[in-house]
Image (cartoon, rainbow, N blue to C red):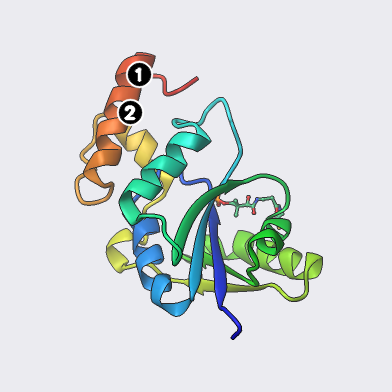
């Protein structure tokens, strides 16, 4: 039997409710979903890739049906390694469209068997991004209901460790 396997890739620095909403929505659509954290150890990142994987695993679990992994190199090559032909991406607003459109077409050019499926998150999260989450957090804003409490707790300790400047 052919398995429907999808990859939901991203930076997830950090994971927020918009991401978790997309994961919950697409989980029932596929036999297996691989949440894939890009290995981009940027200086400006708040969390290491290992920490991001661990946080997502703690929130969504990792079993035969849903896995959380990291990847480097081309996304389409990662899809091959895990036996997937579908990429899931969240589409929040028109502003996301151009970047997502380019990536979807480039990925299909690199591997014509790959299709990208766009999913819209719940309206409450349609403006949410990891970049804004970090900015609001650093400036002391309230992120209740937008970021899961365990992630907020880790952000708080990261901020304390770094004296307010993130991981770098
Ligand atoms: O959450 P992000 O940062 O918007 O996710 C971007 C991501 C990880 C999907 C994209 O940067 C990616 O796929 N990187 C892997 C390298 C790659 O395949 N580049 C060509 C994409 S067309």
Name the disc covering residue 129, or none. Answer: none
Secondary element under disc 1, as helix, strand or loop, is loop
Task: Say above or below: 78 vs 54.
Answer: below
User: Quick check: is the Cβ at mark 1 less than 8 Å away from ligand 1?
Assistant: no
- Seen at 47% across and 57% down, the residue is 67
Whether label 2 lies within 8 Å of ligand 1 gets the answer no
Splitting the image into 4 quarters, where does residue 160 fall? top left
Report the number of numbered marks: 2
At numbered mark 2, what does the secondary structure look like: helix, strand or loop? helix
Contact? badges 1 and 2 (CB < 8 Å): yes
Q: Which residue is pictured at 32% across the width and 36% down the height?
A: 136
Q: Disc 1 versus disc 2: distance between alpha carbons?
A: 7 Å
Q: Position of residue 68 (x, y in %)?
A: 48, 52
Q: Residues within 10 Å of mark 1 (few under 14, many from 20)?
A: some
Q: What residue is pinned by disc 1?
A: 164
Location of residue 106 in the rendering, given as x and y in whole percent from the top left corner: 75, 64
Q: Give the percent coordinates (x, y) of residue 46.
A: 44, 30
Determine which residue is flagged by label 2. 138
Q: Is residue 111 above or below residue 152?
A: below
Q: What residue is shown at x 66% (from left), y 62% (from top)?
A: 79
**Would you call the spot at circle 2 few (<14 residues within 10 Å), some (14-19), or many (20 or more)?**
some
Mark toward the start of the polypeptide (1 vs 2): 2
- Residue 24 visible in the displayed image: yes
Is the N terminus in the top left, top right, bottom left or bottom right quadrant?
Answer: bottom right
Residue at image x 36%, y 62%?
Answer: 126
Q: Quadrant of residue 117?
A: bottom right
Is residue 13 at least partly visible in the picture? no
Towards the viewer: 168 or 138: 168
């Amino acid at each position: 039997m052919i398995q429907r396997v999808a990859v939901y890739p991203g930076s997830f620095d950090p994971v927020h409710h918009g991401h978790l909403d997309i994961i919950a929505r697409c989980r029932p659509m596929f036999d297996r979903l691989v949440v894939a954290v890009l290995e981009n150890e940027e200086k400006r990142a708040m969390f290491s890739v290992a920490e991001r994987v661990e946080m997502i695993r703690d929130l969504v679990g990792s079993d035969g049906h849903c896995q959380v992994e990291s990847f480097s190199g081309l996304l389409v090559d990662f899809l091959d390694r895990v036996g997937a032909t579908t990429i899931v991406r969240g589409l929040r607003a028109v502003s996301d469209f151009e970047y997502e459109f380019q990536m979807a077409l480039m990925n299909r050019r690199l591997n014509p068997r790959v299709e990208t499926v766009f999913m819209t998150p719940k309206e409450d999260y349609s403006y949410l991004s990891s970049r804004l989450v970090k900015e609001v957090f650093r400036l002391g804003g309230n992120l209740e209901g937008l970021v899961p409490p365990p992630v907020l707790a880790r952000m708080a300790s990261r901020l304390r460790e770094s004296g307010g400047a993130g991981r770098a």
